[in-house]
Image (tube, helix red, strand yellow):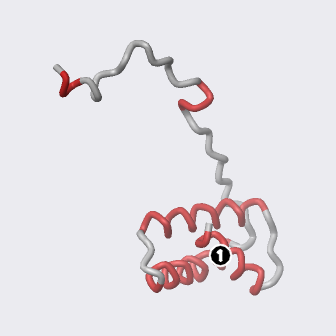
Amino acid sequence: HFLLRGYLPDPRIEPISPALQELKLPTFRAHSPLLKSRRFLVDILTLLSSRCQLCPAARHLAVYLLDHFLDRYDITTSKQLYAVAVSCLLL
């Protein structure tokens, strides 16, 4: 009985608030004019994450952030684009 104490739900605990139950993620529209550069940027993120020995989840999150950023903002120079990609990996 005492072994199950930590695993069974306690009826005295309040349920999770509705705001925390489901996280609403922004929609990805794939309307960026920079989609042609995406492959190059993902390759950069892959190389950097391998060099820093980051887990695959970090790389996937960086690509996710990059996709959503490029979907909303127009970057004009390649230096800015590179900086955005590296920043997504650092986050």
Up-down relation of residue 64 to residue 21 (above or below): below
Quadrant position of the N terminus in the picture = top left
Q: Is residue 3 toward the left or the right of residue 62 in the image?
A: left
Q: Regarding mark 1 in the picture, which secondary structure is present there?
A: helix
* Residue displayed at 65% across by 53% down: 28
Q: Residue placed at 55% from the left, 33% from the top?
A: 22
Image quarter hosting the C terminus = bottom right
Count the numbered circles shown.
Answer: 1
Q: Is residue 81 above or below residue 18?
A: below
Q: Residue 13: horizontal and vertical position, in percent? A: 45, 18
Q: Quadrant of residue 4?
A: top left
Residue 90 vs 72, above or below: the answer is below
- The amino acid type, in three-letter code, at marker 1 is Ala
Q: Position of residue 47 (x, y in %)?
A: 49, 85
Residue 81 location, x and y as percent? 73, 79
Name the residue rendered at 83%, 79% in the picture. Answer: 76
Residue at the far front: name it: 2
| Residue lying at 81% horizontally and 84% vertically, measured from the top left | 77
Nearer to us in this view, 23 or 29: 23
The residue beneath circle 1 is 85
